[in-house]
């Protein structure tokens, strides 16, 4: 409970998820929060995108959007190499698109500045 946070869209403050749904560690090269569940205000299109550079090079994924303002807020990995296989079918929020409301301190902080406790899919 001490580290509980609510994830908001940086563009319009719509609630997109919370830290109770975190289920994985941030992979090297990707600045994301990995969740197994999000709110109904997170949408995605049926068309797959393919990463042409960076950590998602060669990966197929669906881009996640905020239903309220249309901002891109993350992705769902559809296919990847073995290094990112553990992220497939999970919701990955871009940290630079998300703000966190920390419940204990009642503070709003950028997701990139928050360190959540280590979580694994096994937990």
Image (tube, grey):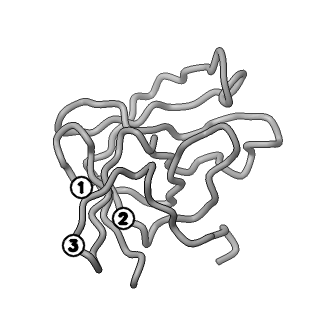
Q: Residues within 10 Å of mark 3 (few under 14, many from 20)?
A: few
Residue 24's place in the image compared with 119, above or below, is: above
Residue 89's place in the image compared with 107, above or below, is: above
Q: Is disc 3 in contact with disc 1, using a CB cutoff of under 8 Å?
A: no
Checking the image for residue 71, the label placed there is none
Mark 2, residue position: 18
SS assignment at label 1: strand
**In whole angstroms, how far apart are the C-alphas of marks 2 and 1?**
8 Å
Upstream in sequence: badge 3 or badge 1:
1
Q: Residues within 10 Å of mark 2 (few under 14, many from 20)?
A: some
- Residue 117 position in % (x across, y down): 56, 72
- Residue 73 position in % (x across, y down): 38, 38
SS assignment at label 3: loop
Quadrant including the C terminus: bottom right
Question: What residue occupies the far right of the structure in this picture?
Answer: 82
Residue at image point 24% right, 55% down:
15
- Residue 32 position in % (x across, y down): 52, 46
- Left or right: where 26 falls relative to 12: right
Residue 28's place in the image compared with 65, above or below, is: below
Checking the image for residue 15, the label placed there is 1
Mark 3, residue position: 106
Quadrant including the N terminus: bottom left
Question: What residue occupies the far bottom of the structure in this picture?
Answer: 1
- Residue 38 position in % (x across, y down): 38, 56
Q: How crowded is mark 1: few (under 14 residues within 10 Å), some or many (20 or more)?
A: many
Q: Is disc 2 in contact with disc 1, using a CB cutoff of under 8 Å?
A: yes
Residue at image point 51% right, 63% down:
115
SS assignment at label 2: strand
**In whole angstroms, how far apart are the C-alphas of marks 3 and 1?**
15 Å
**In whole angstroms, how far apart are the C-alphas of marks 2 and 3?**
14 Å
């Amino acid at each position: 409970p001490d580290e509980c946070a609510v994830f908001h869209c940086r563009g319009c403050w719509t609630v997109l998820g919370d830290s109770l749904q975190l289920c994985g560690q941030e992979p090297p090269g990707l600045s994301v929060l990995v969740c197994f569940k999000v709110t109904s205000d997170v949408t995605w299109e049926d068309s797959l995108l393919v990463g042409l550079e960076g950590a998602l090079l060669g990966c197929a994924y669906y881009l996640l959007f905020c239903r309220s303002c249309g901002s891109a807020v993350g992705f769902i990995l559809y296919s990847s190499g073995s290094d990112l296989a553990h992220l497939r079918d999970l919701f990955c929020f871009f940290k630079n698109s998300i703000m966190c409301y920390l419940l204990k301190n009642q503070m709003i902080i950028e997701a990139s500045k928050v360190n959540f406790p280590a979580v694994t899919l096994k937990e």
